[in-house]
Image (cartoon, rainbow, N blue to C red):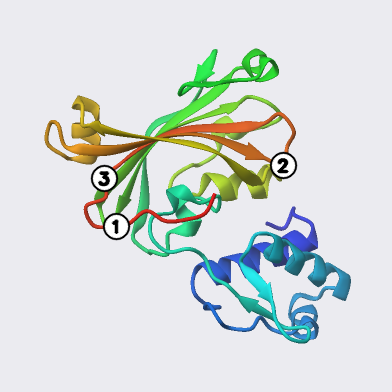
Amino acid sequence: MSELPKYRQIYETLRRRIADGTYAPGDRLPSESTLCHACGAAHLTVRKAIGLLLKDGLIVCGQGKRSVVKGAPRGIGILSISGTASALHHAGLSTQIIRRPELRTWSEAFTFPIEAHEQAAGCICFERLRLLDGVPVFFDVNMLPNINLPRFMSCDLENRSLFDMLRMLYRIVVTGGTQQFFAIRADRRMQDYLKVPAGHPVLQLNRKIDTNRTGFHIYSQLFCVTRQYSLTGTF
């Protein structure tokens, strides 16, 4: 994190404290002066960090100069632009890497057409199984255009949020997107990964995710079971 600009370091620290509940919904953030002293930063730097939190919807403006924590969404955050690991307020979330990142050619992504420059750049694809307290909850396949992502192939994706990693390493921020929902029955792959019987109901989501980088999209396909957890989030 030391390679990030100072305002990004402060933003990431505050974001993490909101996500882990150190600052709970309804709490006021420390005053600007307190944050300046604690972080060794100028007022303008702290204001820039707070502005990002406000833009992300993690805080709201309160009376005076104190911002009020809105909090991270609860439940399984696969419907949220904050991402699964960030949006799920649960210490038992873990990741099993099924297929490490590899380069592929592509012409479409989960029924979504891709742009010509993305197709020309090639695709970075990887697969993960996400578990809560050791119980499989969903399996995802992710496809990213191989555009200005140095050393991504060697990144450690174990128990990390993809959205957080893209934001911190490459300053790629998710801004919204399109989702398609399908009700399907478990095939052999879903039976093996999600530990459900043949024909068990499974929710499939195809997503084309927009980012702040022009012409760069994240494509993902998720298969999830919701026996114990609700799906939540905003998109």
Q: Let me know if residue 104 appears in the view.
A: no
Which numbered disc covers residue 212? 2
User: Quick check: marks 2 and 3 in contact, CB under 8 Å?
Assistant: no
Q: Which residue is mark 1?
A: 229
Q: Residue at x 67, y 15 (%)?
A: 116
Please tell me which of labels 2 and 3 falls first in the chain: 2
Cα separation, mark 2 vs mark 3, equals: 31 Å
Q: Residue at x 56, y 78 (%)?
A: 23
Residue 212 location, x and y as percent? 72, 42
Residue 32 location, x and y as percent? 78, 81
Q: Which residue is mark 3?
A: 225
41 horizontally vs 52: left or right: right
Residue 114 location, x and y as percent? 60, 20
Q: Residues within 10 Å of mark 3 (few under 14, many from 20)?
A: many
User: Quick check: marks 1 and 2 in contact, CB under 8 Å?
Assistant: no
The residue tagged with tag 2: helix, strand or loop?
A: loop
Q: Amino acid at mark 3?
A: Val
Q: Residues within 10 Å of mark 2 (few under 14, many from 20)?
A: few
Near-viewer residue (132 or 230): 230
Question: Is residue 235 positioned above or below 50 on the image?
Answer: above
Among the 4 quarters of the image, the one containing residue 13: bottom right
19 horizontally vs 29: left or right: left
Cα separation, mark 1 vs mark 2, equals: 31 Å
Q: Residue at x 70, y 17 (%)?
A: 117
Cα separation, mark 3 vs mark 1, equals: 9 Å
Please tell me which of labels 1 and 2 falls first in the chain: 2
Residue 24 location, x and y as percent? 52, 78
Among the 4 quarters of the image, the one containing residue 64: bottom right
